[in-house]
Amino acid sequence: MSDFKVSFRENSPQGVSNKVHIMDLKGYLDAHTTPHLEEAFEKLIAEKKYNILVNCRDLSYISSAGLGVFMAFIEEVRMNKGDIKLSNMSPKVFNIFDLLGFPMLYEIFKDEGEAIKKFEAKT
Amino acid sequence: MIKRLCRQNVPLGCGADHSDMRIKKILFAVGSAVLFVIVFVIDAILKNIEGGLDGILFVRLLLVAVAFVFLYFYVDSKIKESERSQVQRLGASSVWAGILIGAYIVVSILPLNWFESRDLQLYPRDYLTILFSTLLSVISGLAAIVTVRHVKDMLFYKRTRGTKRNFVLLLVVMFGAAAATYNLRPLETSLAKTILFTLAILFIIINSFRLSWIAYLSRREKIYAMVYALLAFFGFMAINIILSEMSSLTKALLYFNYPLYIFVQLSALFGSVYFGMAFISTLFHLPTAAAFDRKQNEVSSLHNLSRLITQVFDFNDLAKTVTKMTLEVCEASSAWLEVLPADGKQYDHKLDGIISQHNIEPENVEQILFGGEHTVRSLVLSSKKILLVDNVKNDRRTSYISNIKDVGTLLVVPLISHDELIGILYATKEIDHGFEEDDVNIVSGFADHVTIAIENAKLFKKSLEKERLQRELLIAQEMQKRLIPQTLPLFKSVDMKAVSAPALEVGGDYYDIVMFDDYRVGIVIGDVSGKGVGAAFYMAEVKGIFQSLSKIYSSPKQFLVKANEALISSIDKRSFISLIYAILDTRTGELILSRAGHCPMLYISSDKKEYVKPTGMGLGLRAGKLFEETIEEHNIRMKKGDVCVFYTDGVTESRSSDGEEFGYERLLELVSRHRSRTSDEIKEEIIQGVWNYTDEHGYDDDLTVFVLKWQGD
């Protein structure tokens, strides 16, 4: 039940030097599985990849500990002129983000493409 | 069974048995003495009667036999009483040989008239001869019994399957040879006797190879054993010679009892052969005695160590014992033990791992371990193999310590547990080539024991630690229970009930109330992100903030803004707190509500079933204006029968066995179904509902429910 996986993709539209690094989250993100997500963020940040899009299509649950991970990295990412954006949330997962007021802190998109466009618009 | 225990010197509970044995012993001694006196009287009477009294002679034979059986039981119980070492047994045997020879000498110099031989029969010339024959026979028999009994104990030391069989066969043949003579005249001989006698000698020789006890004597004991064995050998040899001549002494024994004579003779033969063999064998063992002593020492050290493993849990005590034993085991001149930190951590100071040293200065230890780029320590750390430097002064590997005076040989032994290096044991010797191959072997065997002992001590420490933490947690649990209200205030117009259960010992859920005046009550429900002790600390902090700020700021929004300000500086950036705060006027039923990231309030009235969810961000996420702008206030005017439920996500996010959440729909449906019941009943229904839904998986999150029911107009 508490299976959780993070996989990485890259999106590099032609001629755009600023790549968007996409994380696909899958499964159940709670206190036991948050270390995986932390590692994933640490990995990207260590590689100076600050344009991060988190695709939540296959994320079935996120606990408060999971939400905390986003808070842990947002400051550093934004300081480096990057951003963490989220997309493709199921209504249930969106509700958890929404309850806590995360839409006021992060840009959350219905669709991955919109989010990538937003990243591109910035550069 | 009890008898066996008594023999092992168990002091308690065997008193009755002890006195029993003593009485038996006395009875045996007195019984045999009486029988010997009777035999003497019979002999004295028979002296004056000529021949033809076969019946009486047969009775006399029986009496003699029974008397010696009694004597045997007496000796046996006497020997069992005293636990003797092999050397003492040897000593006792040689003493008895001496006693017997002494008796022979005394009797032979007495002016006795002895016997007249006629027709292969012996006729005593006077009563004194009969008396001394009897005495001599009894002493000879006694000496034979004692000797055979002692030799039996020596034979049976570390016995094998054949030992008992060979010994029993010897006894059978000996008694056979003796019994074969029961109807012979004293000076007569028979073929059966000669054959059995020869056979007995054969078994004596076979039995005399059982000398395994010699190997286990210390060097000192071996020297004693040699002396005693030699004395006993000569003693029994002399007895043999005396008894093989047809002297007056021999005749005295023959006259008393022919079978006894044969038994004594064979016993003396057994004694001389066995002790002769013992002497030679000890002599050959003597050169290796010192080595054996050392091995013995090693074995007992290892034994002590393995006992220590189960007894010493104090790390430093253990380390001290280990280094001391290392000195003993390989006769090293100095030794020390280094325990490596777990999980690749580092010590604050590099010598912190040296927990015990003997006969060496810390400076020298430091130089040997860290004095160069490639030290013996780093070699062993990478190879995890035993390192022996035979000549420290001239070895390339130890060139960096060639100036240390007292180190000639250096032995470095890694302590490995489950493929992990947990420590290193060092031993040195002043001379070079000081450690032999078997020293290295024994130390490496010893190291395995040390590893287990260290692991044991660590585990013990860990479990103590765990127990202590468990106790602390229980205290924390008690304290946290006191942070939530023990009772809720009672109002005519409103009925309030609450419950909170942490998933672990302590948790991050919180509810509280505050009274502003007689009518207005503030209700807060909160949830700290995460679970356990970390969450519990923040929960306590929230309690402090709530109790102080709620009195000052009477609007829910103001309170939340100020609470966020207070929290944001102390809270970890990945933690946050969700709160819902409501102020209720118990006269009017007016409820003002603000929410900071918390689960929406469930509101059930006659015409509405809804979640009330004013916007608002969790506490600790953003400071100042950014936070303040998100917070809304919401007003409700409660009417008779309206129910408000505050709760934490432990309710809505509880999962069934197939992974589905309890959810908002279920909660809403459940409460509206029971809205006509009391607050307490509604609260119980929710808890029960969640409990049933989770299928007895238990809550896996902290869970809090606060129910409020308006009863006024």
Image (cartoon, coloured by chain):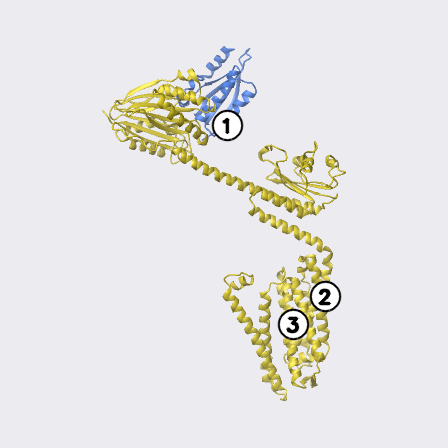
Chain colours: A blue, B yellow
Q: Are marks 2 and 3 in contact (CB under 8 Å)?
A: no
The image shows residue B520 at horizontal and vertical percentages of 30, 24
Residue at the far right in the pictured view: B394
Helix, strand or loop under label 1:
helix
Where residue B20 appears, x then y in whole percent? 51, 69
How would you rate the neighbour count of disc 1 (Cα within 10 Å): few for under 14, some for 14-19, many for 20 or more?
some
- Residue drawn at x 48%, y 20% as measured from the top left: A54
Q: Chain of mark 2?
A: B
Q: Amino acid at mark 2?
A: Leu
Q: Is residue B521 visible?
A: yes
Q: Which residue is mark 3?
A: B143
Residue B539 place in picture, x, y as percent:
41, 28
**Residue B445 shows in this picture:** no
Q: Are marks 2 and 1 on the same chain?
A: no
Q: On what subunit does the disc labeled 3 rest? A: B
How far separated are the C-alphas under marks 3 and 1?
87 Å
Q: Which residue is mark 1?
A: A35
Tags 3 and 1 on a common chain:
no
Q: Earlier in the sequence, mark 2 or mark 3?
A: 3
Residue linked to disc 2: B230
Q: CA distance from mark 2 to mark 1?
A: 82 Å
> Is B678 in front, or is B370?
B370
Disc 3 and disc 1 in contact, CB within 8 angstroms: no
Within the image, what quadrant is residue B532 found in?
A: top left
> Can you tell which quarter of the image residue B434 is in?
top right
Residue B276: give x, y in percent of width and height: 72, 66
